[in-house]
Image (cartoon, rainbow, N blue to C red):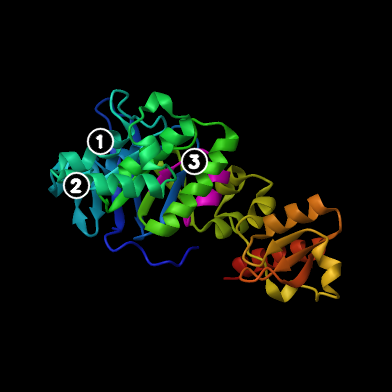
């Protein structure tokens, strides 16, 4: 979990017995209680129809809850004006929702314009955010959504959601509409962005791999928004709370766990000679075990060199046995917590 301090205005989101029952008697969410800590990314995941998107939309009152309370930094959202509330909460959806007749700069400036920001302040913020998401404002600002790729438009959607420096960001399957290669690149860029802005983010996804890759904590939901487990990715994969979670995360959760388990320096074998390792595969000491395993398999040497992230010098050797043992030790440690 990233220990970088949250943004100054990042808000804690609290759901206290929140439910949604429609007039025809349909129960979308029965009663959900959880707290999203300020500055963390929490992923909601579960089978189709379990209420994930309903929960997200209740947080910014696109759907009104019928029971319970939702608090934004301790303030009940039902006591706030719904329109003003939505301007304080960024929202990113699956198909972006950019205005096709507006330029990229104008799309990004939507909320600042509604808030009455000056042209100078708005222009500066738009340029800052487009730079932040990897789009040169001089090159892309005057273009239209139809002139950009799907991945670029998704980045504009994130920039637009962050434009007024919201207290929280809601994301409803934001990367699912792009192809797998672009999705991984967008996820990498988003991780970089979150390390910079440290916003409170609630992400809905149907993809467990995405949740494990991006989230500080994962909420596993079953029918009617029932909370089955709320845990870090490592804990979820190592210690499923019940049979439902165990089946949902799948039998390959041991492999998934390697993606969230860091390299343990204590399990490194000593470097015999520098020449032994410089010609073979290597990973940085701040990489995950999955990165080390991939490098080891690609290299075909039976080991992978681990290097100092600051000077790239080898500090030890990691074998396939050590990788397997490291994953098993992490699982055992969590099970005994």
Q: Between residues 57 and 309, which one lies in front from this camera angle?
A: 309
Q: Residue at x 24, y 27 (%)?
A: 23
Q: Residue at x 36, y 41 (%)?
A: 137
Q: Nearer the viewer, mark 3 or mark 1?
A: 1
Q: Nearer the viewer, mark 2 or mark 1?
A: 2
Along the horizontal axis of the image, is 204 left or right of 182?
A: left
Helix or strand or loop: what does disc 2 sit on? helix
Q: Is residue 226 above or below residue 268?
A: above
Which residue lies under the disc numbered 1?
A: 62
**Magenta region:** 202-219
First in residue order: circle 2 vs circle 1: 1
Q: Between residues 263 and 230, which one lies in front from this camera angle?
A: 263
Which residue lies under the disc numbered 3?
A: 46
Helix or strand or loop: what does disc 3 sit on? loop
Along the horizontal axis of the image, is 283 left or right of 113?
A: right
First in residue order: circle 3 vs circle 1: 3
Helix or strand or loop: what does disc 1 sit on? loop
* Distance from the alpha carbon under mark 2 to that under mark 1: 31 Å
Q: Position of residue 103 (x, y in %)?
A: 30, 30
Which residue lies under the disc numbered 2?
A: 120
Q: Position of residue 284 (x, y in %)?
A: 66, 64
Q: Is residue 46 above or below residue 332?
A: above
Q: Between residues 246 and 191, which one lies in front from this camera angle?
A: 191
Magenta stretch contains residue 126: no
Q: Position of residue 165 (x, y in %)?
A: 27, 52
Packing grade of label 3 (10 A; few <14, some 14-19, many >=20) is many
- Is residue 138 among what the camera can see? yes
Q: Position of residue 258 (x, y in %)?
A: 66, 57
- The answer to which quarter of the image holds residue 155 is top left
């Amino acid at each position: 979990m990233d220990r970088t301090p949250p943004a100054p205005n990042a808000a804690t989101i609290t759901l206290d017995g929140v439910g949604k029952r429609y007039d025809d008697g349909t129960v979308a969410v029965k009663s959900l209680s959880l707290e999203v800590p300020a500055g963390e990314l929490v992923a909601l995941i579960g089978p189709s129809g379990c209420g994930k998107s309903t929960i997200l939309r209740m947080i910014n009152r696109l759907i009104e809850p019928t029971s319970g309370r939702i608090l934004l930094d301790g303030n009940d959202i039902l006591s706030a004006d719904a329109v003003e509330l939505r301007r304080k909460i960024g929202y990113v959806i699956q198909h972006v929702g950019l205005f096709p007749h507006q330029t990229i700069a104008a799309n990004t400036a939507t909320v600042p314009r509604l808030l009455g920001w000056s042209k100078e302040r708005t222009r500066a913020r738009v340029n800052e955010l487009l730079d932040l998401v990897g789009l040169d404002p001089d090159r892309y600002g005057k273009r239209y959504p139809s002139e950009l790729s799907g991945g670029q438009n998704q980045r504009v959607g994130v920039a637009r959601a962050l434009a007024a420096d919201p207290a929280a960001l809601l994301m409803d399957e934001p990367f699912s509409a792009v192809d797998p290669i672009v999705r991984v690149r967008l996820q990498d860029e988003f991780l970089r962005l979150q390390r910079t802005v440290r916003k409170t983010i609630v992400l809905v996804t149907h993809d467990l791999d995405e949740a494990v890759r991006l989230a500080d904590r994962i909420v596993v939901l079953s029918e009617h928004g029932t909370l089955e487990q709320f845990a870090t990715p490592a804990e979820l994969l190592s210690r499923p709370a019940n049979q439902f979670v165990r089946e949902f995360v799948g039998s390959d959760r041991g492999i998934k766990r390697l993606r969230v388990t860091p390299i343990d320096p204590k399990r490194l074998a000593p470097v015999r000679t520098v020449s032994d390792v410089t010609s073979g595969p290597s990973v940085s000491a701040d990489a995950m075990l999955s990165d080390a395993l991939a490098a080891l398999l690609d290299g075909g040497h039976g080991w992978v060199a681990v290097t100092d992230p600051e000077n790239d010098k080898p500090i030890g050797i990691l074998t396939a046995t050590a990788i397997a043992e490291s994953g098993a030790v992490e699982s055992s440690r969590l099970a005994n917590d």
